[in-house]
Image (tube, coloured by chain):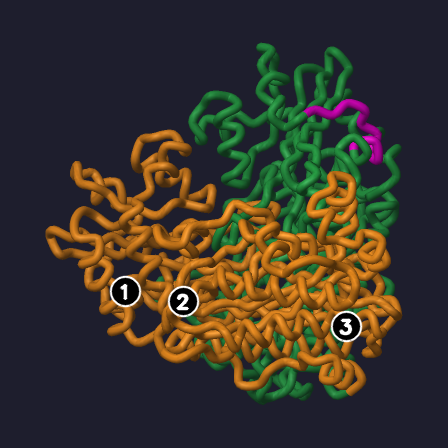
Chain colours: A orange, B green
């Protein structure tokens, strides 16, 4: 939790930005695993944490803008609670820690909202909050979801997208744990070790130092399978282990790094060549990212590097500009270059990925590859983004393109098919856009070159 | 997953037991953490796994008893799914692995149920399934929850309560990971180490070897706070660390052990004395548990041991039987002796704790302490239970009893108050009721005596 002045200032700004009506921020409840009493580790809603700072279940916060009043709603502990749960601060005390004077029982929520006033609320992404809003508003859940406030959503995105200095410290803290996780993964990257064992160990490290992993770890020899949370493999010599993992720190800020490591720490010539193209894409992107240019153009530059790199290796042919306009590199990197990061690893994805990453001037592309870019708009100081280029050989996609003759003029399919058992390589760092360029969000960079990674595995 | 014959046999038995109508088993969906795309690690519903064996989201299973038909409902992968997620077996193939012939798209669920037939379903504990049932049945969520089938519930409890040999192997596997977790915790139990670090490490171990911890780890110097998931303490010499933790294995079976360790591995005289009373309660319970006696009577015997042990130490006075009838030991152990365990650590708690643990002959007690016993009925071969006696000095509870003169004739409050900074000790093992008695569910017992634990910490 930050100093209360920070929350007061944020709420003041939000109030001015929205201008009128009631603002309702619903906190999260517990989420049952296999019965109500066995819940997943609690995670507060990110916007609730940003404005209210309190991370226990079953809270709500309301601003009545016209009457300049604010309320924290929740339930006080009973004497029985104290016997079983120990002495904990009262709701009143907790409200006071974040600068809120008035507290009310959670059951007062309908009364507070029943005033024929405009209610601004965010799109609920949890079933529990969909149910609560459905009852509060007397609408079915689909209508309750659809009725979210676009004004409130945009006001929050504007504020949360620009990270303050105290937020950067939290992001650096999450980054330090992410660093430690990847070093452990590299050291464990030996033939015969199971993916599950490594994934479990680094997840334990994230829990030890903070709250949890910031997203489900990807750790697999099948790096070409992009949405892959399977950890059933046993590491084999000659293969690559792609590890995309990060930590959520104690205050819910995220880190997100990817490194791809040759099992046992010895790269083949083929692996080195592909690694070095991805490395150049990463380093050039970091050199390029700065205020005034769009992230879409940085993504396009990565496609240029991938195209030319693979052309040098004899997999592709033709003119660079023509190939980029045709979307050729998307065969090898069908995903976007990166996304905003903060209190969520995909920052504010609950509020709408396109609202976060695009605007009227910079709209989402419809072309395969480009369309997967989560954040395409102009960069501004205070943006925090991931940079995650990759090259993958996805058998199903290569087969589809060859069969359907997609971009066949640019591709030597027979050469490409020599890489069908390659897997994939991704390298990912996190950056802050500054006044003049960008800087990485970590004190120490993870091993990134082939030589550095080989050394880390063998150390 | 077991051999398909096992699932076929279980479903056949369930069908016979319920007798008529439609049986609907709803699988679980993903549960969002902070946005839809960032979900907690998936956990299938336990009854769904027991009868259907498939552990991916968004499935449903229906038996039409009169027409002797069964259906698995779910969605097939698209070509896009395969590009992003790799080659996975089709719904049809997966159904066939567990002996189900007919598959249908999930969207067919309303059609299948719209036949004016009696629909047996279980009480939904997740908001998502409450919403699905509410829409399917065209009732509000409260009514949808209340409309669950008591016949189906009882039939499932009867079957799942008696563990088969293949289930015991799974429980032993979960037990082996639980063993490893506690050994790590004991070795790390040194002054200056943070509770969070140890809790994270053992949670990582559970993930490495299986799916997750079987419940939120309790690991704290404040063992007297029974519902305590705070891990913010730094271990101090002279204190005790209570660790109640277990693993869920790859097939969702649970383990649940508790050990209490003196920080640094050296017990004070006071700690030894209390430890030895709890140890006697544990060992005597394991010696006593057998078919034909109730678990309530084993719990009562633990209260006898605690009463007499603390009377020997000069904290209590008076006649044992009178004290037990008055509920005196509940001051030191306000919780129950144990619970059923299986696919859930509190087995089938979603179906109703009282339906699982009590019956017409053995009803739940209303007295403080006794009333918290989750499983009180007569023991039968195949029951799997935890045995978890403890002695705690809960300042708020001692204060309340002294102030309200509760059981004052039996208690030397001035002596008890010498233990206000003691914390609490709990020891817990898992047992299987056999034909003649019971046996522990592990190959190797965790260090349990003071000497064994001291040795484990210092090794």
* Residue at which label 2 appears: A379
Calculate the distance from the C-alpha at mark 3 to the C-alpha at mark 2: 31 Å
Tell me if I can see residue B192 in this picture: yes
Q: Residue furthest front?
A: A319
The residue lying at 18 percent from left, 47 percent from top is A21
Determine contact: label 2, label 1, CB under 8 Å: no
Above-or-below relation of B224 to A111 = below
Chain of residue at mark 3: A
Task: Identify the residue shown where x is 28% and y is 51%.
Answer: A152
Residue in view at x 65 percent, y 45 percent? B376
- Rendered image: mark on residue A95: 1
Q: Which residues are magenta?
A: B95-104
| Residue at the limit of the structure toward the left, as seen here | A67
Q: Nearer the viewer, mark 3 or mark 2?
A: 3
Local secondary structure at mark 2: loop
x%, y% of residue B394? 48, 69
Nearer the viewer's eye, disc 1 or disc 3?
A: 3
User: Which mark is on residue B298?
Assistant: none
Task: State whether discs 2 and 1 lie on one chain.
Answer: yes
| In the image, residue B150 above or below residue A278 | above
């Amino acid at each position: 939790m930050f100093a209360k002045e920070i929350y007061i200032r944020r709420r003041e700004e939000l109030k001015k930005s929205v201008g009128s009506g009631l603002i309702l921020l619903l906190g999260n409840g517990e989420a049952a695993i296999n019965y109500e009493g066995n819940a997943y580790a609690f995670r507060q809603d990110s916007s609730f944490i940003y404005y209210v700072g309190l991370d226990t279940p079953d809270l709500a916060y309301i601003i009545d803008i016209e009457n300049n009043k604010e309320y924290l709603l929740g339930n006080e502990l009973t004497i029985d609670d104290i016997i079983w749960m120990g002495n904990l601060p009262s709701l009143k005390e907790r409200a006071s820690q974040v600068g809120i004077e008035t507290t009310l029982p959670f059951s007062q929520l309908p009364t507070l909202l029943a005033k024929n006033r405009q209610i601004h609320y965010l799109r609920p992404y949890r079933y529990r909050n969909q149910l609560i809003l459905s009852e509060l508003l007397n609408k079915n859940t689909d209508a309750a979801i659809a009725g979210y406030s676009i004004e409130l959503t945009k006001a929050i995105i504007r504020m949360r997208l620009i990270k303050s200095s105290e937020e950067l410290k939290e992001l650096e803290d999450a980054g330090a744990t992410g660093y430690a996780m990847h070093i452990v993964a590299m050291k464990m990257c030996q033939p015969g070790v199971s993916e599950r064992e490594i994934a479990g160990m680094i997840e334990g490290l994230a829990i030890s130092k903070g709250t949890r992993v910031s997203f489900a770890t990807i750790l697999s020899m099948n790096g070409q399978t992009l949405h892959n949370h399977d950890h059933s493999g046993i590491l084999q010599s000659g293969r690559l282990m792609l590890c995309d993992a990060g930590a959520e720190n104690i205050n819910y800020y995220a880190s997100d790094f990817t490194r791809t490591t040759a099992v046992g720490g010895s790269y083949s010539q083929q692996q080195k060549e592909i690694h070095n193209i991805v490395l150049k894409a990463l380093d050039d992107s970091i050199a390029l990212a700065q205020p005034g240019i769009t992230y879409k153009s940085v993504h396009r530059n990565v496609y240029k590097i991938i195209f030319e790199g693979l052309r040098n290796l004899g997999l592709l042919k033709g003119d660079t500009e023509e190939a980029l306009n045709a979307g050729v590199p998307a065969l090898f990197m069908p995903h976007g270059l990166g996304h905003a990061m903060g209190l969520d690893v995909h920052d504010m994805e609950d509020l709408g990925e396109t609202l976060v990453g695009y605007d009227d001037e910079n709209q989402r592309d419809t072309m395969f590859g480009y369309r997967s870019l989560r954040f395409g708009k102009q960069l501004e100081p205070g943006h925090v983004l991931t940079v995650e280029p990759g090259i993958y050989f996805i058998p199903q996609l290569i087969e589809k393109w060859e069969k359907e003759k997609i971009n066949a003029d640019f591709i030597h399919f027979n050469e490409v098919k020599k890489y069908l058992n390659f897997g994939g390589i991704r390298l990912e760092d996190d950056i802050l856009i500054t006044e003049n360029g960008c800087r990485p969000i970590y004190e120490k960079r993870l091993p990134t070159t082939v030589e550095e990674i080989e050394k880390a595995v063998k150390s």
